[in-house]
Image: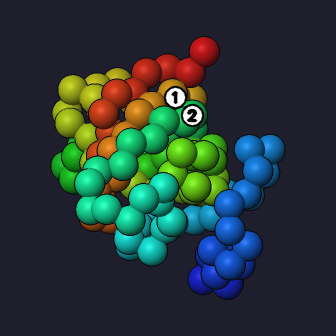
Amino acid sequence: MKAEVLIAVLISGSLGAGTALSTEMKDMDMKSMPAKSSSSAAQHGKTTGVIQSVDAAQSSVVISHQPVPELQWPAMTMAFKATPQQLGSLKAGDHVQFEFEENNGAASIVQIKPAK
């Protein structure tokens, strides 16, 4: 079922900012997601979301985030790499604003803070 939802999202293209769709994409290969250019340069995005889990041992955080218009991404749940300092006091359920960099299918947190 998750694959069917993902395929429907990819086929339908970019979704509006008001969309409530949140597709589980925790371990998805992000290379298949559309980006604003086809170059291999890092792409930057920023959005808001809710922390689902924090894995300090893997230096990662799973966030259910809102759409990222600049990358043409719909709302989804995915893992981001993060430094120990960025993970700090983050915990499941926290609402956050964050900036990230996506490069060759890997997304890394650049800045993260509590949402207002």
Pinpoint residue 58: horizontal percent, then vertical percent.
22, 53
Nearest the eye: 111 or 45 = 45
Which corner quadrant holds the C terminus?
top right
Q: Amino acid at mark 1?
A: Val
* Mark 2–mark 1 distance (CA, rounded to whole Å): 6 Å
Proximity of marks 2 and 1: CB atoms separated by less than 8 Å:
yes
Left or right of 26 on screen, residue 64: right
**Which residue does the image show at 20% across and 36% down from the upper left?**
83
Which corner quadrant holds the N terminus?
bottom right
Pinpoint residue 107: horizontal percent, then vertical percent.
33, 52
Residue 96 circle label: 1
Q: Report helix, strand or loop for mark 1.
A: strand
Q: Residues within 10 Å of mark 2 (few under 14, many from 20)?
A: many
**Which residue does the image show at 31% across and 62% down from the upper left?**
39
Q: How is the image coloured?
A: rainbow
Q: Give the quadrant of residue 54.
A: top left
Q: Which residue matches tag 2?
A: 48
Q: Give the quadrant of residue 79.
A: bottom left
Q: Amino acid at mark 2?
A: Thr
Nearest the eye: 38 or 69 = 38
Residue 98 visible in the snapshot: yes
